[in-house]
Image: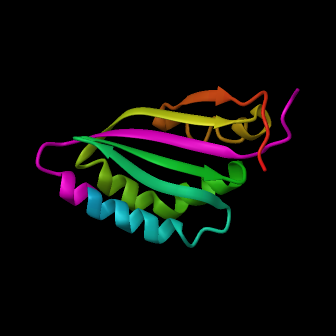
Amino acid sequence: MATQDKCCTIAPYFRIHEGQLETFKNLSERFIAKTSEESQCLYYGFSFDGDQAHCREGYEGAEGVLAHLDNVGELLEESLKIADFTRLEIHGPEEELAKLREPLAELKPQFFVLEYGFRR
């Protein structure tokens, strides 16, 4: 059973530099404040395990992902001064991922193609 779901999720994982955890958490609050204004964002949040952070985020489609990255670009640059990407996953149907492959190539994500499932 193929899916009609066009949701795209981004799953960035960060390793926070020593002594920068509180600064990163403060940045997380700023990310959340900016992202909360995005109409195509379905969910967004940060979780932590020691010096590792994960941002859990979903968008209605590729356009929502691109709008988000445009909206938080400066904050992302700021965060990458105190943390490193350890992994970046992008999940969604191929039709939507095709719109993201070129614009996100510099970030070197791993793309996962959604083939089966549903969303309520």
Question: Is residue 45 on the magenta stretch?
Answer: no
Q: Where residue 25 appears, x then y in whole percent?
A: 28, 58
Residue at the spot 56% in from the left edge and 40% down from the top edge? 104
Q: Where residue 40 appears, x then y in whole percent?
A: 68, 62
80 or 52: nearer the viewer: 52
Question: Is residue 19 on the magenta stretch?
Answer: yes
Q: Quadrant of residue 13?
A: top left
Residue at the spot 63% in from the left edge and 35% down from the top edge? 91
79 in relation to 52, above or below: below
Tag count in the figure?
0
- In the image, the segment drawn in magenta is 1-24
Residue at the spot 62% in from the left edge and 60% down from the top edge? 41
59 or 103: nearer the viewer: 59
Q: In this view, does 86 lie to the left or right of 106?
A: left
Residue at the spot 47% in from the left edge and 35% down from the top edge? 88
Return the residue found at the far front: 120
26 or 120: nearer the viewer: 120
Q: Which colour scheme is used?
A: rainbow
Q: In this view, does 6 lie to the left or right of 15?
A: right
Return the residue found at the far left: 19
Q: Is residue 70 left or right of residue 97?
A: left
Q: Where residue 1 appears, x then y in whole percent?
A: 88, 26
